Image (cartoon, rainbow, N blue to C red):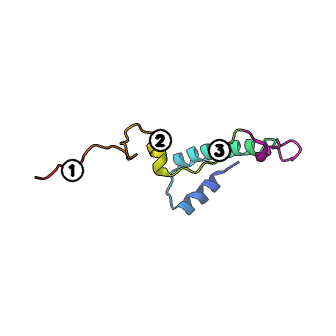
Amino acid sequence: MIEEKDIDRLALLARLKLDAAEKAVLTKDIGSILGYVDQLAAAPLATDLATAPAIDPLTLNNLRADEPVSVAEEGLLQTKATDKAGYLKVKAIFAERS
């Protein structure tokens, strides 16, 4: 586990001034973090290729067919506010000048 001399070294590298109470808290906290990392390192891994699931992306049947659609056409297809020429209807933003 981590010791106070390790905390002193880390504080020196980080240019921190720590008092005894802060060192004690950091020793406990970093020790528990390193203990958790040790648990993760000890966990079994599926490194054997025989145990890994084999998925062939070419056999998936849930892919849609590619159909070329322009961005403008896609936007017009998703709205009902179009005029007779097929343009998108929007509110006027400029007042007419007389």
- Tell me, yes or no, whether the highlighted magenta stretch contains residue 56: yes
Residue, far left:
98
Query: Is residue 80 placed above or below 71 in the rendered structure?
Result: above
Residue 52 as seen in the image, left or right of residue 11? right
Residue beneath disc 2: 77
Q: Nearer the viewer, residue 27 or 64?
A: 64
- Report whether 66 appears left or right of 57: left
Q: Tell me where residue 38 sits by quadrant.
A: top right
Q: Secondary structure at mark 2?
A: helix
Disc nearer the start of the sequence (3/2): 3
* In this view, the mark in front (3 or 2): 2
Q: Residue 81 location, x and y as percent?
A: 37, 39
Residue positioned 78% across, 41% down in the render: 43
In the rendered image, the residue lying farthest to the top is 80
Horizontal relation, residue 38 to residue 17: left or right: right
In the rendered image, which residue does mark 1 sit on? Answer: 94
Asked whether disc 1 touches disc 2, contact meaning CB atoms under 8 Å apart, the reply is no
Q: Position of residue 33 (x, y in %)?
A: 65, 44
In the rendered structure, which amino acid carries the disc numbered 1?
Phe
Specify the segment rendered in magenta: 46-61
Q: CA distance from mark 1 to mark 2?
A: 26 Å
Rate crowding at label 2 as few (under 14), some (14 to 19) or many (20 or more) other CA atoms within 10 Å: few
Seen at 49% across and 46% down, the residue is 74
Q: Amino acid at mark 3?
A: Ile
Residue 3, label in figure: none
Q: In front here: 96 or 17?
A: 96
| Number of residues whose C-alpha sits closer than 10 Å to that of mark 1, classed few (under 14), some (14–19) or many (20 or more) | few
Of 1 and 70, nearer the camera is 70
Residue appearing at x 46%, y 39% in the figure: 78
Q: Tell which residue pokes out farthest to the front in this image.
A: 84
**Residue placed under numbered mark 3 in the picture:** 33
